[in-house]
Image (cartoon, rainbow, N blue to C red):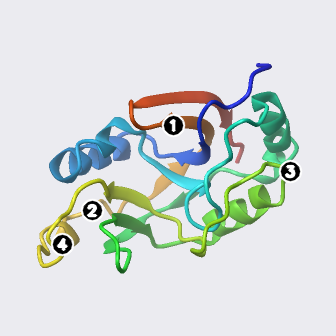
Amino acid sequence: MDRCLKNDAYLVLLIPEPFSDQIYNLRMKYDPFLAKLPAEITVLGSSGTGQIKSGQNIQKIIEAVDDKITKIKAFEFNFKKMSKFPGSKIFYLEPEQRDSFDNIHTLLKSTSIEVKPIPYPYNPHCSIHSTSDLDSENKEILIEMICKDKIKIDKLALIEFDFPPFELNILKVWELTC
């Protein structure tokens, strides 16, 4: 794949079915735009680091991840609660066990992949609402029942995303070993 990113990109851990279906349903209820995105937790391109800069050679990004992928193992976690980033309109599901997410973020941040600067520390999350104003006094979203079952993460993906118009390209998916 000898082309450059047209848009900013992200490295994400994909959340499998049936959990992805539950996330889709929550997003449809609170933010249908987000329902167009895969159910995921970003490990490079959200908090901690900004998006992966457009213009980079996709093959070089893939090779940078390939060099680290054997250090990224499949793991399990569960969501503990719905939270909201202070001073924002972003509501998200928060993982109870965050060590694996933190370790993967740190590992990928150490590659040659160029990212935009961002002032926020890394906070693993699965966004449920972010594109419209939701009355901050509306506590309904914060008490949504979330599945407490263990979720096995075994896929990392490189996605390129542009809005508007809505364009999402999954450029590469890596299978994580146990």
Q: In this view, does 112 lie above or below 150?
A: above
Say which of marks 1 and 4 sits in front. 1
Label 4 near label 1: C-beta < 8 Å? no
Disc 1 versus disc 4: distance between alpha carbons?
30 Å
Disc 2 versus disc 3: distance between alpha carbons?
37 Å
* Residue that badge 3 annotates: 112
* Residue that badge 1 annotates: 161
Q: Residue at x 29, y 53 (%)?
A: 131
Tag 1: amino acid: Phe
* Residue that badge 2 annotates: 146
Residue 116 lies left or right of residue 14; in this view the side is: right
Tag 2: amino acid: Ile
Name the N-terminal-most of marks 1 and 4. 4
Disc 3 versus disc 4: distance between alpha carbons?
41 Å
Disc 3 versus disc 1: distance between alpha carbons?
20 Å
Tag 3: amino acid: Ser
Image quarter (top left, top right, bottom left or bottom right) of the N terminus: top right
Q: Is mark 1 on a helix, strand or loop?
A: strand
Number of the label disc, if any, that sits on residue 171 = none
* Residue that badge 4 annotates: 143
x then y, percent, for residue 72: 74, 52
Say which of marks 1 and 2 sits in front. 1
* Label 4 packing within 10 angstroms: few (<14), some (14-19), many (20+): few
Q: How many marks?
A: 4
Say which of marks 2 and 3 sits in front. 3
Q: Is mark 2 on a helix, strand or loop?
A: loop
Q: What element carries label 3?
A: loop
